[in-house]
Image (cartoon, grey):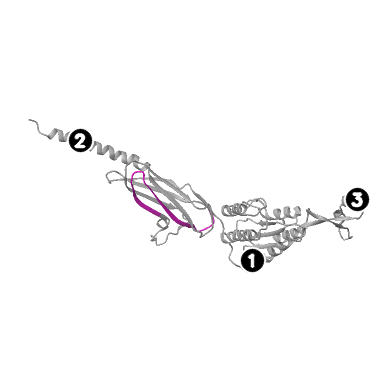
Amino acid sequence: MSGPGPFLAVLLACTILVVGLAELHSLKKWNRRVVLQCQLDMRLTEPGEIATLSYRLSNTASWPLSFVSVSFLFDKAVEIREEGRDEAPGLRARNSYIVDTALRPRQACRGAIRLSLRERGSYTLGRVYLETGDLLGLRSVIRSFDLPISVVCTAGPAPEQPELETLGGFLGDVSVRRFILEDPGLILGYREYTGAEPMSAISWLQTARTGRLMVKQHDYTVDTDVAVLVDIEAVKKPLAERCLSLVRTVCDELERLQIPYVVLSNGDLRSGEKGVGRVHNFEIQRRIGVCRFVRYRGFRHLLASCAADGARKGYIVVAPARSEELTAGVRRLRAASGSRVCVLTGKEGEANA
């Protein structure tokens, strides 16, 4: 009579083989069955403004995962703003956020991370390291990938300075002037010629009908616009950043007063179309955020082209500092446009209108 020895040996060998195959399967497949989806609630922000990164971690397999860890390693410009979070020493530790969990079959967990950007620029948020344990709990598998999310941080508003009072007075004059300039395209009616009107204002058709000299009576324009001229120059970073903060502040004020405006520059703060409103302002703020202070031509060429245009509008000039070239160009622009020109500089204490 044979003993159970050979049968138990075969059973043990089969068990070891099955467990080994299952372990190998867990190492190769389980990590791939975890899906991470992320979404940021804004694409344009400003330094210190809190944004929320929402994530959804799901197990697409039909078996449970006893250990799942997600490590978010953010860009050095990202600051995690979660309350009660312990700050570990070292920049790498401060910019990481770890989520540990276990997932049942077909289960998903959700969460959110509050964060902000430290300074102006265009960023991708960072990388993700997704770790899962194996069947036996002996090893783990790590998969890494970039977060497919980019965000632009525009310049913050300029701090309150005495020179900004010049901007307020200038924009007040522009707001008033919008309603005292006659628009030749808007005709309210006709009135009798008094002799003070130019000959071009006479309506010969109405004169023939009435037998008296008649002139057109125009409505007042509501479309006087402002051009913001920005001198892009590779100066020291604090000074250059202050210039962009001034541009941001000027655009915010123009939006508040609902004055149509256009931003023109001699560099990579590229020109756009005239306008006003949320979409127009979003695009300008985005361009401020991605600006790298690349200069394509001298600022005097931009001032000269605006002076040659001769359009009747307001001009706001933002430059790093005053110079003889800037003063001469502004003087020509003021003479050509027939209106005041407001000059703001990144160097504190220099402004005039």
The answer to whether mark 2 and mark 3 are in CB contact below 8 A is no
Q: Please state which amino acid type lies under the numbered disc 2.
A: Ala
**Magenta region, main secondary structure:** strand
Please name whichever residue, 154 or 55, is drawn nearer the observer in this view of the structure: 55
Magenta part of the chain: 97-121
| Location of residue 35 in the rendering, given as x and y in whole percent from the top left corner | 40, 44
Q: Is residue 342 visible?
A: yes
Q: Give the mark, 1 or 2, whose residue is nearer the N terminus.
A: 2
Q: Which residue is mark 3?
A: 208
| Location of residue 31 in the rendering, given as x and y in whole percent from the top left corner | 36, 43
Label placed on residue 164: 1
Please name whichever residue, 25 or 108, is drawn nearer the observer in this view of the structure: 108
Q: Which residue is mark 2?
A: 13
Q: Please state which amino acid type lies under the numbered disc 1.
A: Leu
Q: Is residue 322 visible?
A: no
Q: Residues within 10 Å of mark 2 (few under 14, many from 20)?
A: few
Query: Where the C terminus falls, by quadrant?
Result: bottom right
How many marks the image carries: the answer is 3
Query: Secondary structure under badge 3?
Result: helix
The answer to whether mark 3 and mark 1 are in CB contact below 8 A is no
Q: Please state which amino acid type lies under the numbered disc 3.
A: Ala
At 91% from the left and 50% from the top, the residue drawn is: 208
